[in-house]
């Protein structure tokens, strides 16, 4: 009898990065160099504690992010944010690159200019981004940038951190221009105060969604009124602060239902609900399915 699956593994960047005495903030790896063990490990549901970009040059695979499965073919980029549960399955030899990095490498401290680009690629309605590259010139440009990033990681010459960061930012901008819905720096995002406050709110949700479920709780943490937090959220994302909180709780519940053998009652307690029956009603209200119905249909 198989053992009960109760946890979703969290992989840290050090497990993928090259051996070094320095704390690992970024890594670039040729997929062929990672070996078969890497792909065997990728078939089990797991999370990363870092941002990941895959550039698939050859072959085809299926990539399940949370509960949505995508077919990824050659010359395709896909983006994965920290905390998302994913698994990769390939039926043929895959070639390409994996770029892994912590948030500190994406944007200089105090800068919000890259936030719209970052959010458009890594955090969107489907919680994933798959970007086919059809223009041969763009393909060449992406190859060149990744090779330069790999060279900086390998050579570790003076200021290689800055060189990698600048290459990464340019890479993300090029990718966003070729995404199905190109990311633009809208006037709303230029409001640095509101943008920074909203990103702080999103960060707080990630840290405390299991214990804080009300807009007023987060507004108090940010020292603003709940109505203002809702206004900023609507302005910058199109949905209310309350919807962001509920969506994050629902997403985590779906991750556990899809990737573990925990019961709805066990998941309710894991997500900070004191009453499992209330959790089941909450889940059905916002998904139109009971937890057991979701699990059955997702696994079908």
Image: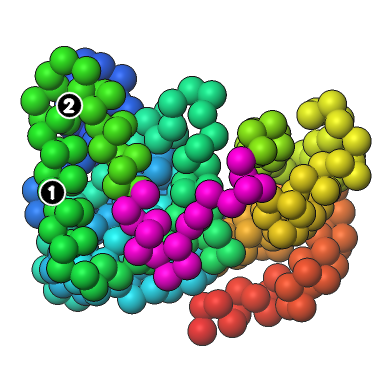
Q: Residue at x 86, y 41 (%)?
A: 228
Give above or below for 209 relative to 25: below
Which label is found at residue 209?
none
Depth check, front residue: 294 or 244: 244
- Residue 176 within the magenta-colored segment of the rendering: yes
User: Which of the image's four quarters has the N terminus?
Assistant: bottom left
Instruction: From the top left corner, tell me how far across and down residue 62 is, in percent.
Output: 32, 72
Q: Residue at x 52, y 42 (%)?
A: 115
Instruction: From the top left corner, tell me how far across and down residue 19 is, in percent.
Output: 17, 26
- At numbered mark 2, what does the secondary structure look like: helix, strand or loop? loop
Kindly identify which residue carries mark 2. 19
Q: Is residue 206 left or right of residue 273?
A: left
Depth check, front residue: 187 or 74: 187
Q: Is residue 230 left or right of residue 14?
A: right
Label located before the other in sequence (2 or 1) = 2
Q: CA distance from mark 2 to mark 1?
A: 24 Å
Instruction: From the top left corner, tell me how far across and down residue 14 is, in percent.
Output: 29, 31
- Residue 66 within the magenta-colored segment of the rendering: no
Q: Is residue 169 left or right of residue 226?
A: left
Depth check, front residue: 226 or 117: 117
Q: Residue at x 54, y 34 (%)?
A: 112
Q: Residue at x 87, y 60 (%)?
A: 278
Give above or below for 236 relative to 212: below
Q: Which residues are magenta?
A: 173-190
- At numbered mark 1, what does the secondary structure look like: helix, strand or loop? helix
- For disc 1, the neighbor class at 10 Å (few under 14, some 14 to 19, many from 20) is few
Kindly identify which residue carries mark 1. 144
**Residue 46 appears anywhere in the view:** no
């Amino acid at each position: 009898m198989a053992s009960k699956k109760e946890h979703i593994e969290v992989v840290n960047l050090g497990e993928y990065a090259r051996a070094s005495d320095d704390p690992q903030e970024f890594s670039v790896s040729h997929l062929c160099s990672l070996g078969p063990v890497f792909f065997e490990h990728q078939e089990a549901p797991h999370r990363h504690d870092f941002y990941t970009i895959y550039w698939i040059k050859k072959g085809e695979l299926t990539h399940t992010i949370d509960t949505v499965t995508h077919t990824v073919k050659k010359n395709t980029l896909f983006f994965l944010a920290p905390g998302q549960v994913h698994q990769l399955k390939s039926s043929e030899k895959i070639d390409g690159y994996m770029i892994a990095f912590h948030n500190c490498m994406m944007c200089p401290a105090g800068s919000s200019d890259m936030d719209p680009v970052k959010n458009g690629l890594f955090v969107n309605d489907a919680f994933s981004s798959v970007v086919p590259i059809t223009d041969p010139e763009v393909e060449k440009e992406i190859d060149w940038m990744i090779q330069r990033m790999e060279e900086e990681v390998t050579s570790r010459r003076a200021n290689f951190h800055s060189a990698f960061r600048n290459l990464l930012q340019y890479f993300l901008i090029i990718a966003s221009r070729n995404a199905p819905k190109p990311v633009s720096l809208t006037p709303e995002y230029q409001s640095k105060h509101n943008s920074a406050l909203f990103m702080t709110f999103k960060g707080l949700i990630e840290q405390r969604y299991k214990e804080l479920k009300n807009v007023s709780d987060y507004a108090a943490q940010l020292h603003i009124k709940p109505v203002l937090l809702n206004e900023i959220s609507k302005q910058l994302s199109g949905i209310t602060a309350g919807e962001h909180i509920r969506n994050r709780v629902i997403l985590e519940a779906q991750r556990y239902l899809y990737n573990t053998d925990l019961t709805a009652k066990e998941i309710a307690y894991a997500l900070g609900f004191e009453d499992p029956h209330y959790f089941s009603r909450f889940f059905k209200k916002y998904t139109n399915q009971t937890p057991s119905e979701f699990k059955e249909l997702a696994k079908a």
